[in-house]
Image (spheres, rainbow, N blue to C red):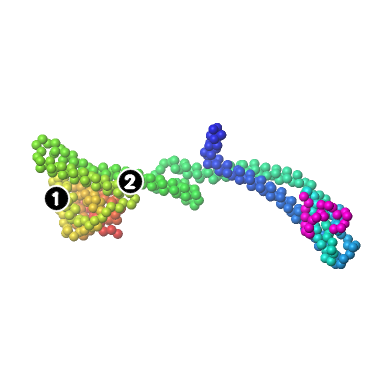
Amino acid sequence: MVKDIGLQSLTKSYVTQIFSILLPFSISVAVIYTLLISGALLFVEDYVLHGYLEREFTQLKDTANEYDENIKLPSTSYMRSYWENDPALPYYVKELDVGTHETQDSLFHVFVGKLPNVNRKVYIVLEENKISSIEQYTNVINLALWSIALVIIFASVFVAYFVAKIIAKPVGKLAADVTDELYPKKQFHGSDRVDEIGKLSRSFSGLVNQLQDSLDIEKSFTRHSSHEMRTPMAVIRNAVSVLKLPNCSEEKKLRNLERIEKACIDSERMLDVFLTLGKDNANLPKENISLLSITESIIENHSELINEKNLEVTLSGENSGFIHAPLSLVEVVLNNLLRNALYYGRKVLSIDIDNKNITLANKIETAPSSANKFGYGLEIVRRICELNGWKFYIQCDDSNFIVRLDFAQN
């Protein structure tokens, strides 16, 4: 259990993980390189000695043009030559075939060959210890090579650590940036890189922006739904107040119950609209809608407010302005525009319908510094228009507020 906890603590640090990968790799490279150098020295030595034997045989072959029992075989302090029937021929070379050989103890190198016009083999035996000093200093060479390998391994420890720190540095900065303050459209550290760090940074940036957009949608939904629910709630509250009257007639009861039912239907419709708008792929069913008819219906729903504020509402236009759009969205848009005009306007409200366009113009007391000061209604209208490709224009001065809505999609 203690060992498991220790191993887990070692893998918590990204630097430690990289270091634990680089260090074994560096050690393996040092060991393999040392073994290759040691083997290469022995291979080169054998290659040189075999080449030397082949040259000696080639020179002997060039001088032996005819059969001669008195051919002088090459002989030095480190090399002896024998005929195949020579009694002095060492026993360990008698069974060797034509070619270059090395004895198992690596002390002798032997070349076996046949001279032209001579029916006997020639054995050239070279004693390695007498011609090459490498074999004599094998232990010293190996000690030197492994000492160098040990130094490289120690150096690799520091190099691997610093390399791990360098590799982990952008990850640490990215982690610090992620835990830092978040704001819309934030680009995290390393987002301009083309490697995996850049890909991770851009993924974080996209995720945070997506979460921010979702949060904005939630906030908008809360604001917009609460704003839209005020009207049906007011209708329900007024209707309930009428129903509580002791002398309420049956006719008034039925009328107010119908108003409550209609307000509930409107509330449910508006909630469905805003839930749909909160999705990335809002797709409501479309139908042919008469702008004149739906505007008349909305004006009728606000008749009490019109009478209360003593406003003169004029509606002009022919009943030929049909649009193909989601009914619920059109109702929300026109309801917000009309309600906004009634709440903030005075004296006169003029509504003009021309084909697929509707224009609302009303008098106001004073123009605010921003159109958003007229409440969330215009924000709701603007967002719905953006999602559906409708054109929305506002013209405002000190005494007039004009809104034009074009339902013709681009």
Around disc 2, counting alpha carbons within 10 Å, would you say few (fewer than 14), some (14 to 19), or many (20 or more)? Answer: some
Dominant SS in magenta: loop
Front in this rendered view, residue 410 or 73:
73
- Tag in front: 1 or 2: 2
The stretch drawn in magenta includes residue 102: yes
Horizontal side of 192 relative to 140 (left or right) equals left
Which residue bears the numbered disc 1? Answer: 312
What residue type is disc 1 on? Glu
The answer to the question of whether label 1 and label 2 lie on touching residues, with beta carbons closer than 8 A, is no
Around disc 1, counting alpha carbons within 10 Å, would you say few (fewer than 14), some (14 to 19), or many (20 or more)? Answer: few
Which residue bears the numbered disc 2? Answer: 217
Spot occupied by residue 134 in the image (x, y as percentages of width and height): 77, 49
The quarter of the rendered structure image containing the N terminus is top right
Q: What stretch of residues is rendered in magenta? A: 84-104
Front in this rendered view, residue 72 or 310:
72
The answer to whether residue 253 of the structure is visible from this angle is yes
Horizontal side of 381 relative to 122 (left or right) equals left
Q: Residue at x 77, y 50 (%)?
A: 104
The stretch drawn in magenta includes residue 148: no
Q: Residue at x 81, y 49 (%)?
A: 129
State which quadrant residue 352 falls in: bottom left
State which quadrant residue 219 falls in: top left
What residue type is disc 2 on? Ile
SS for tag 1? strand
Q: Which mark is residue 78?
A: none
